[in-house]
Image: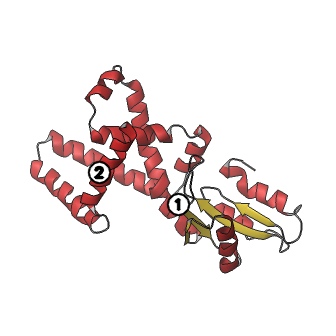
Amino acid sequence: MCIPVKRTPETIRLIAKEMRRDSYLIDISSLKLKTAAALSKIPDKVNPVCIHPMFGPGTKKLKGQNIISIPIRDAKKELAVAKSLFGEANFVQIDATEHDKKIAIILGMIHLVNLALANILAKEENFGLVEKMAGTTFKAQRLLTAGIMTESPELIETIISNPEIRKYAEEIWKDIGRMLILVQENRTEEILKYVLSAKERLAKNIDLDDAYKKLITMVNSVEK
């Protein structure tokens, strides 16, 4: 069934009691806290499996794709069932609370920022000129923004409604405001300090040079 995430817990409750013994109720929704709670209460005759495939319908191959598994009753058994269905994928097992926190960054903030950017681009009167002037950075960002906007409005609303997003959104809003003030007041040294600090911390987890090479390769492959 394909239903809004807000209706998932109640739908789970309703259909679980009608399901046959030893059947599997598999949830693939994008937010898990309330869904996992609902799955934990279904009749013992039904086996719950709670996963979050981190790829969309346009994906051609499972190999290399990530799927998150949320333990409900028997973590080992539920993971085995998921692997039997999506054997070539990479699996990460995590509880519902931590899932929603991480998804706020992985999906929530990305969708929120790109939704705002899409609105700005949509208002641009001479977008054709922007396209002609665009460099690698804009081309890559445009692909991401446009790709996100192919998703249903209902899905986007669900993703950005994750309560865990708020603290990150407030932080980025605060940082943007701070940067604008620093620029307006010509406080160059503070801006440079902010940029270098972010770069150094990010470099501890990401090979920045390699990331840039992959970005160039991606954009070039799309433009062929």
Q: Which residue is mark 1?
A: 65
Residue type at numbered disc 1: Gln
User: Residue 92 appears in which quarter of the rendering?
Assistant: bottom right
* Secondary structure type for disc 2: helix
First in sequence, mark 2 or 1: give its number: 1
Residue 4: image tag: none
Task: State left or right for residue 163 relative to residue 83.
Answer: left
Q: Position of residue 133 (x, y in %)?
A: 26, 28
Which residue is found at the position 44% from the left and 57% from the top? Answer: 105
Task: Name the mark on residue 175.
Answer: 2
The residue mark sitting in front, 2 or 1, is 1
The front one of 112 and 179 is: 112
Counting from the top left corner in percent of width and height, residue 110 is at 44, 49
Q: Is residue 72 visible?
A: no
Is residue 82 visible to the viewer in this orientation of the structure? yes
Q: Looking at the picture, how far across and down is residue 23, in whole percent?
A: 83, 67
Label 1 SS: loop
Instruction: Name the residue: 45% across, 45% down.
Output: 112
Classify 201 as above or below 181.
below
Q: Amino acid at mark 2?
A: Asp
Q: Residue furthest front?
A: 224
Q: Badge 2 local density, few (<14 within 10 Å), some, or many (20+)?
A: few
